[in-house]
Image (cartoon, helix red, strand yellow):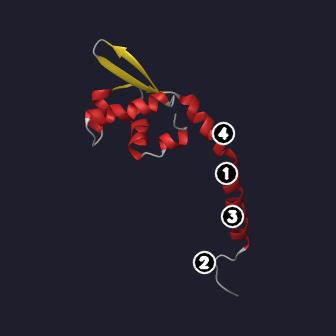
Amino acid sequence: MASTFEVLAEPHRRDILDLLRTGERAVGDLVDQLPLSQPTVSKHLKVLREAGLVEVRQDAQRRWYRLRLEPLAEIDTWLAPYRRMWQDRLDALERHLDTMPDPKDPQP
């Protein structure tokens, strides 16, 4: 089974997840919103489902997909130290810029 990162590396799968952020959607609705055929969307949904990123609910003839947040929370946890590293660097840049003279101030 592919890792979550491998699954998310495919841009169309990220597009599908972006569409599902607003709530549950039927396959047909996803097909209408993407420049992909129905079989292609279904293949991407299968990969997302197998990775645990989406779940499906059958309602008569329609399949409804929705996000599963748990795997995304795991990615967020993994990214946290990198986010802190960038925040520390940006804070250091801000402190440095605060020590520089303002170019709008007239020179004495």
- The secondary element bearing badge 1 is classed as helix
Cα gap from disc 4 to disc 3, whole angstroms:
26 Å
- The secondary element bearing badge 3 is classed as helix
Quadrant holding the C terminus: bottom right
Q: Earlier in the sequence, mark 4 or mark 2?
A: 4
Disc 1 marks a residue whose amino acid type is Tyr
Cα gap from disc 1 to disc 3, whole angstroms:
18 Å
Q: Is 10 on the left or on the right of 4, as rendered?
A: left
| Above or below, comparing residue 27 to residue 59 in the picture | below
Q: Which mark is residue 104?
A: 2
Residue extending furthest toward the top: 60
The residue tagged 4 is 77
- The secondary element bearing badge 2 is classed as loop
Cα gap from disc 1 to disc 4, whole angstroms:
10 Å
The residue tagged 3 is 94
Q: Position of residue 102 (x, y in %)?
A: 65, 75
Q: Earlier in the sequence, mark 4 or mark 3?
A: 4
Label 1 close to label 2 by CB (< 8 Å): no
Discs 3/2, front: 3
| Above or below, comparing residue 10 to residue 95 in the picture | above
| Above or below, comparing residue 30 to residue 79 in the picture | above
Cα gap from disc 3 to disc 2, whole angstroms:
18 Å
Residue 22 shows in this picture: no
Q: Position of residue 23 (x, y in %)?
A: 42, 27
Q: Is 51 on the left or on the right of 35, as rendered?
A: right
Q: Residues within 10 Å of mark 1 (few under 14, many from 20)?
A: few
Q: Earlier in the sequence, mark 3 or mark 2?
A: 3
The residue tagged 1 is 82
